[in-house]
Image (spheres, helix red, strand yellow):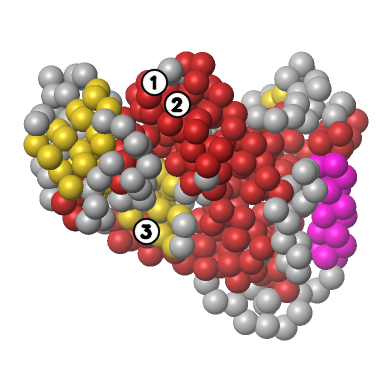
Amino acid sequence: MTHALVLPPDETPTRTVATLLRAYARLLQRRLLEDAPHAVTTRLAALAKEDAATHEAVITAPTVSVLVQTERASDALPSLALELARRGLLGARVRFAAPVAPLVSQTLGLVVRPPPGTELVVEDGVLVVGGERIDLTDGARALAAHPTAEAAFARITEGITLALHDPNPLAMFEAHPEKQGNAFSLGGRPVSDWTDALGRAMALIERHLPALAEEMRLLLDLVIPVGWEPERHFSASYREYIGAVYVTLHPNVSVLAEALVHEFQHNKLNLLLWHYPVLVNGYDFLYKSPVRPDPRPLMGILLAAHAFVPVAELYTRMRADGDKSIETRLADVIGKNEEALAVLGEHGEPDAAGRALLDELGARHAVHRQVLLAPPTAGTHEA
């Protein structure tokens, strides 16, 4: 299961992420049954047996799963009911007494905010808000026209959207000493600036790391904007928010591409960590980090190496295509990967999954060290 969790091979992409995502759906289902027993939860459990693919798509939506993983499972129930009802899979008439948490549908691109004191009724093909029936059988049209609904997502590329609504209760919890949380902000820029820039960054990834881009379309649902930074760039992700990343907008497309690869890799490792310890001593002691000013546990250093080895691969391939603008950054990333892997090699105590991961990181890094010594081949680069 843990084969090729750093980078999938271009020729024969693995299904590692898909396998882990299926296991994650089962984990979320167990938590829902334990924390929020309800007709919706019971229906989801039945759906897992009837149609595992649909069950996975519904329950692993980041706007739902983050609530399940942060002990707010009951707040996820209205959104889950809406998603089942619009698919005609709810099979019951479900009532939610006021106050009702916002209903978020990534598939419809909407968030519905019931007014205070308003109860909600959901059944197949119908949403009733304060006694007013809204048809769900015409796609998003009727619901989008309702005053309680607003557009909450904008398409970046296939399978990946810009989130204009963020339900993550941990968004302002920040472990990085140079940041102040991840408050939603477009930074004064129109949505089109974000989707255009992020779309170009994804195109760069698709060009140079096509198999990784395929994984991103499978796992990465949401990019959440946290402001505009013309010089520095900040990004973040959370173990409890699989499928979502926070990024600042930046004028350099390669910087955005690096951020997307970096945070996506965190998502992949975080997904693995829901199923395996990876490092049995991952949180025991603090060590000097090659990428942060504060000392980090070994798991933090592994997260860095797991993110930056694929970044080095991206820049290595860009360099081979004739892009000289990233050579300094490439050398910096490879040097820091060397430090991180040395610390992990000396102090890490991996389980079987962690051993496979470290071996893969080491093998890829060894190639990068040799590539760095070779002159780039002639070519052109389009960003």
Classified by dominant secondary structure, the portion drawn in magenta counts as helix
Instruction: Residue at 71%, 49% (x, y): give it.
Output: 16
* Quadrant housing residue 321: bottom right
Q: Residue furthest right?
A: 346
Q: Amino acid at mark 1?
A: His
**Element under disc 2:** helix
Q: Which residues are magenta?
A: 356-373
Which disc is residue 38 wearing?
Answer: 1
Q: Disc 3 versus disc 1: distance between alpha carbons?
A: 33 Å
Q: Amino acid at mark 2?
A: Thr
* Quadrant housing residue 364: bottom right
Q: Is residue 10 visible?
A: yes
Q: Disc 2 versus disc 3: distance between alpha carbons?
A: 32 Å
**Relative to the observer, which residue lies in front, 106 or 369?**
106
Q: Amino acid at mark 3?
A: Arg
Q: Is residue 242 visible?
A: no
Q: Report if residue 258 lies within the magenta region.
A: no
**Relative to the observer, which residue lies in front, 70 or 311?**
70
Disc 2 designates what residue?
Answer: 42
Where residue 308 sits: x, y (%)?
Answer: 69, 48
- The reply, left or right, for residue 344 in relation to residue 153 is right
Vertical side of 346 occupied by 9: above or below: below
Disc 3 designates what residue?
Answer: 155
